[in-house]
Structure formats: structure tokens, C-alpha cells
């Protein structure tokens, strides 16, 4: 791969209950294990960050697909939900659900745009075949 951009983050102080900082940005914050996993829930966690990153990246891919097909997608949004659970083999696994909303666009056209975005989004490409990713188009 010929990298167009590279970023760097540093986790310290205990992983999921430590701190993370992203080089060259204001992102520097505490992490906390979610209450559902026995932690305090008093900070961000990796699943939240992954959900935010995937949703934002997928939305950019959706906008690119819409531009290439000359479809206006004003007011569109992508919601990301990341779940973590046992993989049944002593470790953990992730699953992702993306919810795409494109107001005032026919469902079939919106679905086509979401399908095209799912083929070009780097997060989709990185996760394809590794974890379940469900993309649902919801009518406004």
C-alpha cells in the first residue's frame, strides 16, 4: 500500500483503564472499561472510538458514492454500533452495525449508495471477512 496518511496513538497506564493520546491532535483522554464489562464506565473505550471512526469513514465513502452517481444526499447520516463479546474460544470478538439514513432519496437508490460505500470504505475493507458488519438503510 502507498500510504496517503498515517496517524499515531499511544496508550498508557493500563490499556482499557488507562489513557490514550493521538499525536499532533488535542485527543488526549482517559479510557475506562464499560460498566457492562465490570468497569466504571467513566471514560471512553476502544469500541466507542471504533464506532465513531467507522461511522465517519463510511459517511465519507457514502458521500463519494453519491457524488460519483450524481445523487444529492443532504442531511444524510451514518450511525455506528460496535459490540464486543466472547468469541467462544477464550477471547473476544467484535460486531458492527451501521445505520444509513438518506432523507428524500428512494430506498433502492439509498441502498445502492450504501452498497457502493461498503465496497470503498477502508473500515469496511479492513473488517470484511473478519467480523460481522451489517449495513442497514433506514428510510427517513
Image (cartoon, helix red, strand yellow):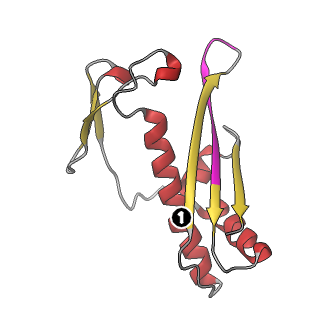
Q: Residue 132's quadrant in the figure?
A: top right
Q: Quadrant of the C terminus?
A: bottom right
Q: Taking 10 as reference, is 24 above or below it?
A: below
Q: Taking 59 as reference, is 21 above or below it?
A: above
Q: Nearer the viewer, residue 2 or 134?
A: 134
Answer whether residue 110 is magenta in the image. no
Q: Which residue reaches farthest top?
A: 90
Q: Which residue is the site of mark 1?
A: 59
Q: Residue 103's quadrant in the figure?
A: bottom right
Q: Which residue reaches farthest front?
A: 140
Q: Main secondary structure of the magenta part?
A: strand
Q: Nearer the viewer, residue 25 or 136?
A: 136
Q: Nearer the viewer, residue 82 or 75?
A: 75
Q: Position of residue 110 (x, y in %)?
A: 71, 73
Q: Position of residue 92 (x, y in %)?
A: 60, 22
Q: Taking 4 as reference, is 51 above or below it?
A: above
In this rendering, the count of numbered labels is 1
> In the rendered structure, which segment of residues is drawn in magenta?
89-98
Rendered residue at 42%/22% (across/down): 33
Q: Position of residue 111 (x, y in %)?
A: 74, 68
Rendered residue at 53%/75% (across/down): 75
Q: Position of residue 15 (x, y in %)?
A: 35, 22
Rendered residue at 58%/69% (across/down): 62
Crowd class of label 1 (few under 14; some 14 to 19; many from 20; radius 10 Å): many
Rendered residue at 20%/49% (across/down): 26
Using residue 21 as the reference point, say whether residue 84 is left or right of it: right
Answer whether residue 94 is magenta in the image. yes
Q: Which residue reaches farthest bottom?
A: 70
Q: Nearer the viewer, residue 131 or 71?
A: 71
Secondary element at tag 1: helix
Amino acid at each position: 500500500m502507498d500510504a496517503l496518511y498515517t496517524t499515531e496513538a499511544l496508550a498508557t497506564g493500563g490499556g482499557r483503564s488507562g489513557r490514550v493520546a493521538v499525536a499532533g491532535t488535542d485527543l488526549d483522554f482517559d479510557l475506562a472499561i464499560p460498566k457492562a464489562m465490570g468497569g466504571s464506565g467513566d471514560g471512553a473505550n476502544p469500541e466507542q472510538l471504533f464506532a465513531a471512526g467507522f461511522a465517519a469513514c463510511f459517511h465519507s465513502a457514502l458521500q463519494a458514492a453519491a457524488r460519483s452517481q450524481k445523487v444529492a444526499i443532504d442531511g444524510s447520516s451514518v450511525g455506528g454500533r460496535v459490540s464486543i463479546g466472547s468469541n467462544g474460544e477464550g477471547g473476544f470478538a467484535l460486531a458492527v452495525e451501521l445505520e444509513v439514513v438518506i432523507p428524500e432519496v428512494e430506498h433502492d437508490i439509498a441502498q445502492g449508495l450504501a452498497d457502493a460505500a461498503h465496497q470503498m470504505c477502508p473500515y469496511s475493507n479492513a473488517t470484511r471477512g473478519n467480523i460481522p458488519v451489517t449495513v442497514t438503510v433506514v428510510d427517513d
